[in-house]
Image (cartoon, rainbow, N blue to C red):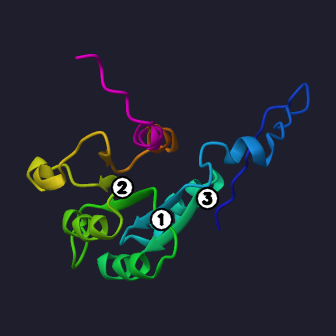
Amino acid sequence: GSCFSIYLPIVAKAAATIPDIGDAKLKQSGQGKTILIIEDDPAVRRVTSGLLKNKGYNVLVADGGAQALEIAQNHSGSFDLFLTDVVMPGLQGPELVSSLLELYPDTAVLFVSGYIDPDRFVDLNLNDRRSFLQKPFSNEALEHELLALFKPPSPPGPR
């Protein structure tokens, strides 16, 4: 038996339309790179996959380590990035990445996790090709990490 009233202000002019940026700009950042997402949470997997597809990335998804290894073994192309949760049931992120890198050694890695315990991240071996992103993360934070991982290596300096 409740009754709600919603009062909205009168607007003097029509709302601005969103400009059409077209597929070219939207897909510009992905440039057709292939990413394997390994995430046990279906919602995180779905949102991350959708975001990356909209950016032009080719995305394959796995719900855990066993499925990721199966996908990797049956994949006919290469991978540009493994985006994996650190803590998952069964095979954990670091161990999974070791196995995946045996098959695809030149692939970049982005670890993600909602845990903040630093002891969990000792064996990630982070460097310019292996990075970490704390969950929850924004679209901008994800894009920033991907751009950093896909940046060509700097040429060696003079000796």
C-alpha span from label 1 to label 3: 17 Å
Q: Is residue 63 visible?
A: no
Depicted 19 relative to depicted 13: above or below: below
**Amino acid type of the residue that numbered disc 3 sits on in the rendered structure:** Lys
Query: Does the CB distance between marks 1 and 2 fall below 8 Å?
Result: yes
For the point 60% across and 43% down, the residue is 29
Answer few, some or many: residues within 10 Å of disc 2's Cα (few below 14, many 20 plus, some between 14 and 19).
few
Badge 1 amino acid: Ser
Which one is earlier in the sequence, the residue at label 2 or at label 3?
3
Question: How many residues crowd mark 3 within 10 Å: few (<14), some (14–19), many (20+)?
Answer: some
What residue occupies the far top of the structure in this picture? Answer: 158
- The residue lying at 38 percent from left, 56 percent from top is 107
Lower position in the chain sequence, tag 1 or tag 3: 3
Query: Which mark is in front, 1 or 3?
Result: 1
Q: CA distance from mark 2 to mark 3?
A: 22 Å
User: At numbered mark 3, what does the secondary structure look like: helix, strand or loop?
Assistant: helix
Where residue 43 is drawn, which disc sits there? Answer: none
Percent across and percent down for residue 68 are 37, 76
Element marked by disc 1: loop
Q: Report the amino acid beneath label 2.
A: Asp
The answer to the question of whether label 1 and label 3 lie on touching residues, with beta carbons closer than 8 A, is no
Residue sticking out furthest to the left: 119
Q: Closer to the camera, 100 or 17?
A: 100
Distance from the alpha carbon under mark 1 to that under mark 2: 9 Å
Q: Determine which residue is flagged by label 2.
A: 106
Residue at image mark 1: 78
